[in-house]
Image: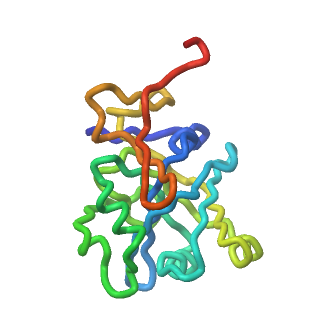
Amino acid sequence: MARLDIALAHSYRLLNHGPTVLISVAALGRRNVMAAAWCMPLDFDPPKVAVVIDKSTFTRELILAAGEFAISVPTRAMLPRVVAAGSDSGRDGDKFTALGIDTFAAQQISAPLIEGCVAWLECRVLPEAHNEARYDLFIGEVVAASADSRVFSDGRWHFGPDDDALRTLHHVAGGAFFVTGDMVTGQD
């Protein structure tokens, strides 16, 4: 697999199709990861994303301390670890170790990026205390982005018939997910 740097102006395309994501953070001598279904691109220049992170989560505590977080887009092959990352708390121990999640270093932030994913966005928090407190909504400015060139290049996702394990997950509630399907265009 080759990681392809994505122009920041096109980083929204990594999330525009509405995948479930993994949010990771490192602060206070700890690290954590959680699954999030409510994550979306918000702006182009500078690129921004919005993600909902509940008040009760350990991830939120660490994000408030760090002022940054990473978004990794997991695959169908990662489904059991995604469900566990969204269900288990990191307060009691390192979820990365417990779930066998490997990481690699980000380019611009200290949060770890997740191996086995197909896209990564590095974000710095744009503090909006009212939105964070009232709506659990965090806004991040994307400072670096990359993708797996096997399924994303030329600014587009392109899942082929042999890429089933690499398709992204889309949570539809109650523990059920869809995976990305075939591409269609307005010309079809």
Q: Quadrant of residue 15?
A: top right
Up the image or down, 183 lies above or below 82; here it is above
User: Closest to the observer: 77 or 138?
Assistant: 77
Considering every residue shown, the one lying at the far right of the view is 130
Give the residue at x 37% y 68%: 85
Give the residue at x 37% y 33%: 151
Instruction: Locate residue 188, reporting x and y percent.
Output: 55, 13
Considering every residue shown, the one lying at the far bottom of the view is 92
User: Closest to the observer: 87 or 142?
Assistant: 87
Give the quarter of the figure containing the N terminus. Answer: top left
Up the image or down, 162 lies above or below 75; here it is above
Give the residue at x 58% y 75%: 54
Give the residue at x 36% y 60%: 82
Q: Quadrant of residue 132?
A: bottom right
Considering every residue shown, the one lying at the far front of the view is 174
Q: Quadrant of residue 84?
A: bottom left
Instruction: Locate residue 156, reporting x and y percent.
Output: 49, 29
Up the image or down, 34 lies above or below 78; here it is below
Q: State left or right for residue 42 relative to residue 104.
A: right
Q: State left or right for residue 156 relative to residue 12.
A: left
Color theme of the render: rainbow
Instruction: Locate residue 18, reporting x and y percent.
Output: 55, 46
Up the image or down, 42 lies above or below 16; here it is below
